[in-house]
Structures are given as C-alpha cells and as structure tokens.
Image (cartoon, rainbow, N blue to C red):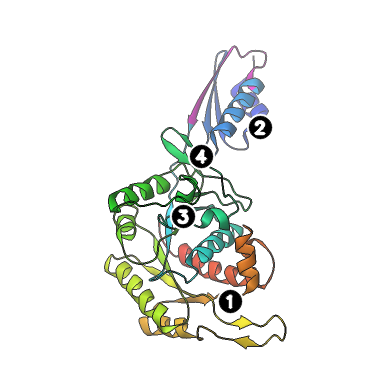
Amino acid sequence: MIDQTELQAILAPIAAGRATVRVEGTRASIILDVTGLPDAAQDALEADLRAAASVPGIEGVRVARTAQRVTRRIIAVASGKGGVGKSTVSANLAIALSRAGRKVGLVDADIYGPSQPRLMGVEGRKPAAHDKKLVPLATAFGVPMLSMGGLVEEGQAIAWRGPMAAGALTQLVDANWGAADTLVLDLPPGTGDVQLTMIQKHRPTGAVIVSTPQDLALIDATRAIDLFAKAGIPIIGLVENMAGYACPHCGEISDPFGTGGAEAAATRLGIPFLGRIPLDIAIRAASDAGTPPAAGNGAEAAAFAEVAGKVNAWLETQKG
C-alpha cells in the first residue's frame, strides 16, 4: 500500500508546489491551488494529477480546488483634455510594468473613444464571457486587455448616457482578470461620469496624469489632479508627453509644444515628475501598427521603462 509521502513525491513534479496530498486507506485527497490559472489549465492540471495518482493501492482520487484572492491594484491614467497621448502612455506603461515583473491587465475605460484594440494589436477580436464575467483578450505582449472597442462593432458610435457608461466600466474592471495584480485604466479625458464612477466603485490605488508641455494642456491636467486630490486618490506623478521632436534628417531637437512645462508644473503642485516621452514618428508608427514601442528595445522603450520604473517603485511603497 502506498503512503501519503510516497504519493506526494509522485505528484510533486506535476503539481509544481500547487498540491497537498492526503491518503486515507485506499483513497487519496488532493488540495489543488489554482490561483491565477485559466480554466483550461486548471482542468488539464487536475486531469494530470488524477492520472498520476491512480497507482496500485489507490482506488479513488478526490480533488478539491482552492484559489487565493488576488489583491488587485488599479492605476488610473488620466488627462484633463484629449489629444495628449494618454492612451499611448497607458498601453506602453502597462507593457513596461509587465516587463518589470508585474502581472498587469489593461482596461480601456475610454468608453466613448476606445483606441486600445488598435494600440495592442487586437482589432476585430471579441472577448468571451465565463460565469457572467468577461474574459480579457490575450495580447502578444503578455498584457491581457479589455476595451469597449471589443464589445461594439467597429466604427459604431457609442451614444450612451452616464449610467450606461458607468455600467460598462464596471463590466470591464470586474472581469475575470486571473492572476493580474495590477490594472492600468486608460480613462477618458476630462472629469466626467466615468471618472466619478471609477473613484466611487473601483477606487484606484493611485493616478498617473499625462500632459503635453503646452500651457493649455497643463491647465486642464491641473483640473484632473484636483479631482483625484479631492477624492483622496494619491497622485503617482505627472508624465510629459510629446516632449521634443528630433528631426530625422539633421537630428536637431525642436519643441513644438514647448519644453519643461510639465516638470515645472509638477514642482509647483508638489507631485512627482515621472519623465518625458518624446514626440517621435517611431512611436506613432508603432502604435498605429499595434506594436507598442515599450515592447521593443529602442530609445522609445527606454523612455517608457523609466516612467514604469518610477511607478513600480511607488507601488512597492504601498501597503496591501
């Protein structure tokens, strides 16, 4: 007759630390930790364990699945106005955080103007649902994502009033995110219904504000900062996007939107400055092609990695 220690040793190479075994007479009980595993992987692992446990002396195998609750942090990426590259920053921040070792999911919460399906190379794909929850789309960059753009027909206008938009946001955030411990939320511009719902129902751990260097964008960014401050949401920092353009022919740097404005504003407001992202044709081309530059190894990837490093360091200081 096989004992508990022997059966545990047989199953160990398959279970990879996820299974605890008990043997009572000729029956084996396996407690299987499935935290973070997709349903198909859970089923496959259970089947493998059952087969491996069917050895002489064992006449019955019982498997009980358990899962630990994942503590999920939400990073809201916001801007006071449109056109500052907030969605591009969101996508590349999510990828850069993933490359830094975090288990990241991306939520395109820009309900009325979703652009993440194109940025992340999943245009035309629709998410499935399981147990009344959406299942995020897998991407080529290791960052699962959900977007309103995946729930409506391409090019269809989303003419919804506030409550419907708020309900859509809840479906996206409360999806089956599996092992993801950090969600990056690409918010719509401004300070409207979606932002208020997010603050009230899905309270972010912190907010990243995106602005260009120009004065008008900074004025609007200040309003976004004020919204989060009044709600008691910490500001992780300010990103200056479209900061400087290098001529591809002569290499001369020009500043069509000004320079240093966001860093000066961060200093004035007493919030961290997270870094500058250049105005670069390579970023535009890669984004349109669904291959975010943060997934590569060029100078553009380094700029996003610097921002992600500071965000990651901030997250490490937070408890819970």
- In the rendered image of this protein, does residue 179 appear above or below residue 279? above
Q: Earlier in the sequence, mark 4 or mark 1?
A: 4
Q: Earlier in the sequence, mark 2 or mark 3?
A: 2
Which residue is the site of mark 1? 279
Say which of marks 4 and 3 sits in front.
3
Separation of marks 4 and 3 at Cα, in angstroms: 25 Å
Separation of marks 3 and 1 at Cα, in angstroms: 23 Å
Q: Camera-side residue: 211 or 81?
A: 81
Q: Which residue is painted at 60% across and 72% down in the image?
A: 303
Label 4 crowd bin: few (<14), some (14–19), many (20+), radius 10 Å: some
Q: Earlier in the sequence, mark 4 or mark 3?
A: 4
Separation of marks 2 and 1 at Cα, in angstroms: 49 Å
* Image disc number at residue 108: 3
Q: Position of residue 270 (x, y in %)?
A: 37, 80
Q: Which residue is painted at 32% across and 65% down in the image?
A: 191
- What kind of residue is marked 2? Ile
Q: Are marks 2 and 1 in contact (CB under 8 Å)?
A: no
Q: Camera-side residue: 271 or 32?
A: 271
Q: Earlier in the sequence, mark 3 or mark 1?
A: 3
Magenta part of the chain: 53-65
Label 2 crowd bin: few (<14), some (14–19), many (20+), radius 10 Å: some
- What kind of residue is marked 3? Asp
Which residue is the site of mark 2? 14
Q: Which residue is painted at 42% across and 47% down in the image?
A: 172
Separation of marks 4 and 1 at Cα, in angstroms: 41 Å
Label 1 secondary element: loop
Q: Position of residue 40 (x, y in %)?
A: 58, 32
Q: Position of residue 11 (x, y in %)?
A: 64, 28
Q: Position of residue 217 (x, y in %)?
A: 41, 78
Separation of marks 2 and 3 at Cα, in angstroms: 37 Å
